[in-house]
Structures are given as structure tokens and as C-alpha cells.
Image (spheres, rainbow, N blue to C red):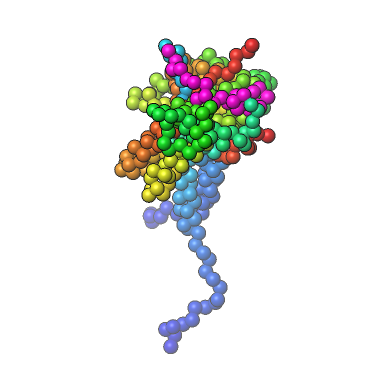
Amino acid sequence: MAKRSAPEVNAGSMADIAFLLLIFFLVTTTIETDSGLNRKLPPLEDQVDPPITREKNIFTVLVSKNDQLLVEEKLADIEDLRSLAISFLDNGGGVGDEACEYCQGERNESSSDNPDKAIISLKSDRETSYKVYIAVQNELVAAYNDLRNREFERLFPNLGINFVSAQKQYDDPRTNADTALELKPKIAQVKAMFPQKLSEAETNKLK
Amino acid sequence: MSKFKKKKGGDLPAISTASLPDIVFMLLFFFMVATVMRDSTLMVVNKLPAADQIQKLDKKDRVMYIYAGKPSSRYEDKYGSSARIQLNDKFATVNEVGAFILAERASKRQELQNVLTTAMKVDSETKMGLIQDIKQELRKVSALKINYTTRVGDYTQNLN
């Protein structure tokens, strides 16, 4: 019997099958890049003796249950929050040991001594809506970032980047180790100049 | 001389589609590699608030997810319409958050257990009370690094 050669399989529908799979993956997957505001919660144990902070070094922000903003016990618009926070942090009203050389603020007696002492206290009500709270947090972080950018650009002008992009570069796992190592002390230095002392106190208890 | 005989007819030859499957497969593999499957189905409405001062969570293996929001329309008749927490694939109460974090932490590699971040994916319409309760639970199990997951956008989008 003559040897019959196997008939060739028609590969014409291969493209269709591959397209089907492709569309399936396109629909079911999401390119998720999780990003958000990083925060650190305070540990639960109460400090034995909480450090005494003077009233003028605390910047109180309260978001009421009607989503209104009270900055230093005065009603304020969220648009002004960033500039208010910057002028508080950058005030540098201290003298002697507490003086702040790099601050460019008004050096007002009744506002913060130096950025290291300045604490922003953010309070919210149980009925405050999350989106407004996030907007407020965003503006407060923006205030810190603006100041850190300014100092980073002043100290390291030859890098040509600001603090935020330096931080991004440092956090990116694709950045090579040498660059990261070079950036690390610079980031730490600027962070120490404007430490993020943002306290999220517990929401007001029901009275 | 018929050596350089003109080819007969002027019609174009058909374009070969033989490499089409290869191209499509290439695209397919790209998408398979570049995308991450959702590991848990969302049972809550999850429209994240917008923020622009954000940091990326690059290393997926050191993140634990907590979802919160109103139950989505499919679950509304069963679970009501007040905001709830979702852990893995089921609804949970505030008290279960601590146990969940401990279980998640135990499932991670030893060297990562101290650097875990808790990503809170909370719907923008939620009230702060629930978030405050979650935060309190996280403090109890000392999971102090948190991330309010947001989408990228100007903060003014949150205000209407």
C-alpha cells in the first residue's frame, strides 16, 4: 500500500483563536498601579510622658461632620489650606537654639518655632466623609512636599530634580543601586529639615 | 528573446497573512505578562478618592488589602446599604480585621513580615467613623504602615 502523507492542518483559524484569547485577557485584566498617600499610625501604647508641646507649635485642622474645615479654630477654605500650612511650617519664629536658618517665613512670634517642632494635628468627626478627609490630607502632604522641594533644589541644584521625583526614583525598584545609594542621604537630609509630623488623632468621640 | 518575459497581468499578489497569528500571540503574551489578575472579586462599591501627592506601592508582595464601602448593588438586598469592610472574598466586621492582618502577615515570607503595608481601598462616600475603627484595629496588631489608596487626580474632584 502506498504511504499516504498526513494532510496538513489548516492553520487559518489560528489567528481567530489567538484574537479570542487576546480579547479575553484585555477584558479581564486591569493594569493596576496602586498608589496612594502613605501614612504611619502611632503605636497603641500610650507614651509614659508625652512631650510637652507649646500651643503655638501645633497647627490644628479639624474637619467637621458637615465637611467644613476649621484651621486654627477658624473656618477656612480648602484652597487656602496648603498656603496656611506652609506659612506655619516655614515660619521659623524661634530664637537662639531654636532658630531655623533655612526658613523663609515671617518669623512670627505666635507661630511655630521651627519645622522640627511644628506639628500638624488633623482631627475629623465620625461623620466626616472620606473623600474630603483625603483631600485635606493631600493638601497637607502637598505643603510638606512643596517645602521639601524648595530645600532639595536649593541644596542640590546640580541634580536637576526636585524632592518628589528624587523620592520616586529612590522608591522605584528599577533604579540601579548606585543611584539609589547616592540619593538616600540627600533625601534623608531634606526629610530631616522638614520632618512630616502629621498627627491623625482619633475622631471625636460621641458626646 | 523571452528571457525577460514580462509577468502576465498587473494584479497585486495577495498579502500573506501567515504571520498574523504570530503578531497576535505577541500581543497576547505582552498582556498576559504585563497585567495582574484581580485576586479577589469586589463586593463593595469602590470608587477611590483622588489625590496627587501620592507614592506608588511597587512591591506587590508586601501589601495587604482592606476594602471598604457600600455593598455593591448585587449584594444590597442581603447586606443592606451601609458601608462595610471586605477582607479577601467576604464581608467582615471591624473585629475581624486584626485576625485577618495576623493571618496575612503569617502567610508572608519571614523577612517581609516587618515591612508590610496595609493598603486601604475605601470608597470615597464612606464616613470616617468606619475608617477610624479600622485604624484602631490596625494599631492593636501594630500594622502601622498604611496607605490610603487613591486614584490620580486633583483634590478638587473630591469636593462635590
Above-or-below relation of A94 to A181: above
Instruction: Estimate the x, y position of residue A63 in percent, counting from the top left.
Output: 62, 25
Tell me, yes or no, whether the highlighted magenta stretch contains residue A119. no
Can you give x and y, in whole percent of width and height, for residue A143 in the image? 52, 35
The residue segment tinted magenta is A49-73
Residue drawn where x is 42% and y is 84% of the image:
B3
The residue at the point 48 percent across, 46 percent down is B28
Assess whether residue A69 is covered by the magenta stretch.
yes
Q: In this view, does B149 lie above or below B104?
A: below
Q: Is residue B141 left or right of residue B69?
A: left
Q: In which quarter of the image is the N terminus of chain B?
A: bottom left
Q: In which quarter of the image is the C terminus of chain B?
A: top right
Depth check, front residue: A203 or A151: A151
On the question of residue A111 being in view, the answer is yes
- Quarter holding residue B48: top right
Residue A168 is situated, as x and y percent measured from the top left of the image, at: 43, 40
Q: Give the camera-side residue of A46 and A3.
A: A46
* Residue lying at 44% horizontally and 85% vertically, measured from the top left: B2
Q: Is residue B49 left or right of residue A91?
A: right
Residue name at image x 45 percent, y 29 percent: A94
Q: Nearer the viewer, residue A177 or A43?
A: A43
Query: Toward which corner of the image does residue B152 lie, by quadrant?
Result: top right
